[in-house]
Image (spheres, coloured by chain):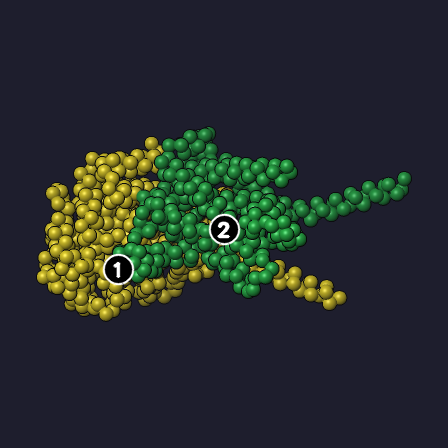
Chain colours: A yellow, B green
Amino acid sequence: MKKRIFAFFMVTTLILALTACGAKDNTTDNASKNTTSDTKNTSNDTKSSDQVDQTSGDNTLTVWCWDPAFNIYAMEQAAEIYKKDHPDFVLNVIETPWADVQTKLTTAAASGDLSTLPDILLMQDNAFQKNAISYPDAFVDISNSGIEFSKFSSAKVAYSVVDGKNYGVPFDNGTVIACYRTDILEEAGYTLDDFTDITWSQYIEMGKDILSKTGKPLLSCTAGESDVIMMMLQSAGASLFDAEGNPYMVDNPVLVQVMETYAELVSSGVMIEVNDWDQYVGSITNSTVAGTINGCWIMASIQTAEDQSGKWGITNTPALDGIAGATNYSNNGGSSWAITSNCKNVPLAVDFLANTFAGSVEFYETILPSSGALATYLPAADSDVYGQPQEFFGGEAVYSMITDFAGKTPSNNTGVYYYEARDAVATAIANVVAGADINAELQNAQDTVNFAMGR
Amino acid sequence: MSKSTRKLSLVKRQKLTGWIFLIPATILIVATSFYPMFRAFLLSFKTGIGANMKWVGFYNYARMIKDTVFIQSLKNTFFYLIIQVPIMLILALILASMLNDRNLKFKGIFRTAIFLPCATSLVSYAIIFRSLFAVDGFVNTVLIKLGILSTGYNFLGHPTSAKIIIIIALIWRWTGYNMVFYLAGLQNIEYSLYEAAKIDGASPFQSFWRITVPLLRPIILLTAIMSTNGTLQLFDESVNLTNGGPANATITMSHYIYNMSFKYVPNFGYAAAMSYIIFLCVAILAFIQMKVGDKRYEG
């Protein structure tokens, strides 16, 4: 009798444990993709609940985005401002890392079942073209919805425009800035002005001098990623694809110049390559390098080194030598809000976005001080909050400076096959740095992208 | 006559009971494993972006031959297979026979210590290995202090050393796992055999090679097939340790399939076709191993 009770008890416990695990896994959908490989669902790593939230209620919007200190914070502030005029509005933010947003979107759209998608999701600008073209049924066209796209920097809006239609509301700023440790520059006898409005050859000259006097390179980057190359390309308004969508790498004079500049940066020691993101941020905060060039979102990482307050200065990026149309402005990253076709109340979503992200200077003033979230909303640049001097960066009004840069950034043609082209170029530059011929590598890269495009 | 009919129905009833126990699990496996595999096979004959697929027959398979990145990933994966699996299995065998020694003290601690790496998360250990072998990481710091190097060597930035780091990481992680299998198998070998060998004057090496290995043949076969299967499907290390390595020098087939499905413009038909190539490789290698393993055992 005792054995039976014990057995019964064990069986119930095990069944309960099984169903508890089962409930969590039911919401992730990986059926037909890779049956022979061991798929550990990446979405199990998100700390939030994996509950499938259908859009519910007339005045509720569900949003997927990442980064509690930045995007989620901004969304919640937007909800507060919107609630002042619409008291019964409810916002439901589900924290989802970008990789998971991409995976969930792909899974939902490929299976044809869009009901698992939220009302609004945040999408990296670089992935916008790819997703909007691959899954045209998943997004809502908001071109004529009353959102004033002219108030945003045109280069930024262009990322979410497909076939002349707008699909996204621009959000955070990826405008490229060049940050320098002014104390190290001073040690070598240079000032921030020496690095403003310069070309890459001047940058390398001064960089070599600073390297010999202080032993510090001017720049670090992650090996195997082509961020630096893409930034340099866009600063001259060039892209990896031409207007018809064909890969434009071989005989692309801007790209050849960019690769030569990159190779020289590495061989002269002015730029060091590290292996991953953590080492990259570490090289900045440990004073291993005397500066960095990246999207303005890097400021949050720089500011984690509190003891370096006041020792940093910001200016624009160097321009390419001898290229017509070369500028000192570029872009790296940034994201936009997209409304999915699963949204049951599109007018509400449009109204919400139009009155906050696309219309409220007060909103941008609120989120700036605590999160450093910079806008691409041009009227916000004139506000006082943006004009306040930032002690960390030498007392300059860097936020209005950066918003000003954003307005001058040339747009580029991301293309649908952006990630394939990016990776092909990263492979090419890794080989060039190891000594291969630039034109041969560009040919390989272009062949790889052509293959990926199915030609 | 009644006796024989009673016997038959008893046999039938036992068989029926057996089937009743098997059917739920069989249905589940067919529905959740075999049916998706069948659908994936059908998918590999289609091509298209995202959800727009059309039938194209063997186009995907023919296309793979011209895919330089896929060929590179194939070479990389087989490189890991040929170098890592034998080293790991031999190491596991040696460790198992050492730990099977009757007179060894603290056996439990050694076994736990060697098995512990298997309990770690694949992602965490790959990330830790990555930071260990960074240019200013622990390994370089030690080598510089010992005077072997003057500046840090970029292990993960050079193709050959990146591959070797992945092999080292794999050996560290999976040796304990295979060692446990061998330890279990060694319990079935009678100690008297070793005693007899010692009396006849056999060296430890000879008793290892002539007694242990032949008697462990079924287990060695099992671990070889499992390791081959695991190495051919390698994913986590490629993504987290080297991210495909300097210029695709360490990318594996599964990593490329993931990129093809989620990072690049999604072409699920092509990805499914590549998965089937992996399946084919594993099936062929397993078949070869079983043929080799079984024949010698019977002979």
Q: Is residue A106 left or right of residue A4?
A: left
Vertically, is B32 above or below A305?
A: above
Give the letter of the chain under mark 1: A
Task: Give neighbour class at mark 2: few <14, some 14-19, many 20+ (Cα, 10 Å).
Answer: some
Q: Is residue B54 visible?
A: no
Discs 2 and 1 share one subunit: no
Q: In x, y percent, where is residue A132?
A: 34, 44
Query: Residue at image x 58%, y 57%?
Result: B100
Q: Residue furthest right?
A: B1
Q: Which mark is residue A283?
A: 1
Q: Which mark is residue B91?
A: 2
Query: Residue at image x 15%, y 46%?
Result: A320
Query: Residue at image x 42%, y 57%?
Result: B125
Q: Which is more toward the observer, B84 or B9?
A: B84
Q: In x, y percent, where is residue B57?
A: 46, 29
Q: In x, y percent, where is residue A34?
A: 48, 43
- Quarter of image, res A248: top left
Amino acid on which disc 2 is placed: Leu
Task: Give neighbour class at mark 1: few <14, some 14-19, many 20+ (Cα, 10 Å).
Answer: many
Quadrant containing the N terminus of chain B in the rendered view: top right
In the rendered picture of this protein, how many numbered marks are placed on residues? 2
Amino acid on which disc 1 is placed: Ser
Q: Nearer the viewer, mark 2 or mark 1?
A: 2
* SS at badge 1: helix
How far apart are the two marked residues, 2 and 1, measured between alpha carbons?
Answer: 38 Å
Give the letter of the chain under mark 2: B
